[in-house]
Amino acid sequence: MSKREAIFPANRHALYEAHGYSAAIRSGDLLFVSGQVGSRADGSPEPDFTRQVELAFDNLQATLAAAGCSLDDIVDVTTFHTDPQNQFDTIMQVKQKVFPAKPYPNWTAVGVNWLSGFDFEIKVIARIP
């Protein structure tokens, strides 16, 4: 049985300490990344929605890199949205920049009514190369 290993990006967020969780857990050749949000360095939400989504992807990439992974290693994505109908176009524009070519990872989007002050969150499972 594989022992789990906590993974944190180089510029660790205040949110991990404040809420007591790991950015990601490595188990064997899989990386389970906790929900990444568009937080500033102090853990507060970025107020501009487009920038919040971009920061969430930046934070995701930093966490992946800390485990030796990249966006190309992602196999499963789950995103959480506070207002999916009105946010979808913005999210798709950012998504197309982040994942510009096939094969795309599988993706599940979930509408929620609370994300602790944030409006977008992304969590993934990646295979570690």
Image (cartoon, grey):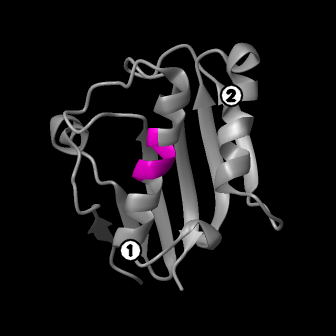
Q: CA distance from mark 2 to mark 1?
A: 28 Å
User: What are the residue bounds of the magenta stretch?
Assistant: 55-59
> Is residue 63 left or right of 12 when viewed as pictured?
right
- Dominant secondary structure, magenta: helix
119 sits left or right of 22 in the view: right
- Residue 90: which disc? 2
Question: Tag 2's secondary structure?
Answer: helix
Circle 1 sits on which residue? 67
Q: Which residue is rendered at x = 76% and y = 16% of the image?
A: 85
Name which quarter of the figure residue 84 lies in. top right
Circle 1 SS class: loop
**Residue at figure coordinates x 27%, y 61% from the top left:** 8
Q: Amino acid at mark 2?
A: Thr
Residue 91's spot in the image, x, y percent? Answer: 67, 33
Q: Nearer the viewer, residue 88 or 7?
A: 88
Where does residue 122 sit, x and y in percent of width and height?
A: 54, 42
Quarter of the rendering occupied by the C terminus: bottom right
> Of the residues shown, which amino acid type is indicated by label 1?
Ala
